Amino acid sequence: MSTSHTSPNDEHHWQPLAETEAKVRALESLLVEAGHLTPADIDQMVEEFVHNLGPMNGAQVIAKAWADPQYHARLLANASAAIDELGFLGLQTEVVVAVENTPTVHHMVVCTLCSCYPWTLLGIPPTWFKDPQYRSRSVIEPRAVLADFGVTLADDVEVKVWDTSAEVRYLVVPQRPAGTDGLSETELAGLVTRDSMLGVGFALAPQATT
Amino acid sequence: MTAPLAILEELPAAMAIPRRNGEPVFEAPWQATAFGMVVSMHQHGAFPWSAFKTLLIEEIAAAARCGDPGSYYDHWVAAFERLLGDLALLTPQQIGNRTAEFRRGDRPDHP
């Protein structure tokens, strides 16, 4: 097995926090410690209000790339521009690099230092993405982490771990499932899960129809 | 329990949260976190919505008097900080110390 990692230790994306942002982090950590809140409470509340962010946007990008070879090429060459074509650049999603899973390479995304995440494409980061365990183990033993998510790979598949930074977000293009030749973009988008776009899952198989 | 959207409708129009197509708009994740903390603690019964609303209106009005309208979520956070002090849930010193740690990068981490 070979494992590469873009930047395990450098602190390339720590920047001094603005006063209010630091205060919000302070309040959040103090209130969580004191048991007045849980991170899940906060995420749930935001999700209740915000419906224009979410993995359905990322799924649309992936489905279009599967269905349209020219869009596929544009996405891999310049993901930010290709995503902008669909109107999904924005909150925490300004510069995006698309990495494509193949039978020989499997990509996964982590933010080792905090929880940078492409909100417009994937919605609110899931709690596990912010978990220190996920963040450190993804670098040290990515295959074990993938196995926890139910993703087992052949030994000759290379695993690449991409460390999100304040500047760059990564979007995994999962492999298109077999048996989807006749599907429309909308139907394809239904097979693209959030986890598959982070590399900790596969796209769903189409419903068997007889 | 009041429906979350209903409590937001209670804010005077000039002080309503920024929205686009009826949805709250956040320019950064910390704004969403600030929003989520206040609404969530209210929903859990930590304070009546009117207590937060009164402070938010004061913060926005005070900033306007200074000639610096500032950003909406700066006021939101300032109001929340005062409310937590009023409720004796956190002291200004606790908040100040922890904020300084985050600013220095001693806690680059999420909680």
Image (spheres, rainbow, N blue to C red):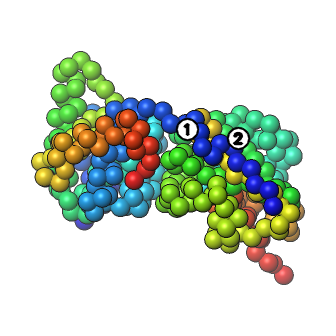
Q: Earlier in the sequence, mark 2 or mark 1?
A: 1
Q: Which residue is mark 1?
A: A11
Q: Nearer the viewer, residue B30 or A134?
A: A134
The three-letter amino acid code for the residue at tag 2 is Val
Q: Residue at x 79, y 41 (%)?
A: A76
Q: Residue furthest top?
A: B67
Quadrant of the drawing holding the C terminus of chain A: bottom right
Is the same chain shared between marks 2 and 1?
yes
Q: Nearer the viewer, residue A63 or A93?
A: A93
The chain containing the residue under callout 2 comes to: A
Q: Indicate left or right for A13 with A81 as reference.
A: left
Residue A64 can be seen, yes or no: no
Which mark identifies residue A97? 2
Q: Residue at x 50, y 36 (%)?
A: A14
Q: Residue at x 80, y 56 (%)?
A: A2
Which mark identifies residue B14? none
Q: Indicate left or right for B61 with A86 as reference.
A: left
Q: Please state the horizontal and vertical placement of residue A198, each as a whole percent of the image.
A: 65, 55
Q: Residue at x 77, y 41 (%)?
A: A75
Q: Please state the horizontal and vertical placement of residue A112, each as a whole percent of the image.
A: 56, 49
Q: Indicate left or right for A151 with B92 as reference.
A: right
The three-letter amino acid code for the residue at tag 1 is Glu
Front: mark 2 or 1: 1
Secondary structure of the residue carrying numbered label 1: loop
Q: Indicate left or right for B55 with B72 as reference.
A: left
Q: Please state the horizontal and vertical placement of residue A174, each as a whole percent of the image.
A: 76, 57
Secondary structure of the residue carrying numbered label 2: strand
Residue A99 can be seen, yes or no: yes
Q: Please state the horizontal and vertical placement of residue A82, each as a whole percent of the image.
A: 73, 38
Q: CA distance from mark 2 to mark 1?
A: 20 Å
Quadrant of the drawing holding the N terminus of chain A: bottom right
How busy is the neighbourhood of tag 2: few (under 14 within 10 Å), some, or many (20 plus)? some
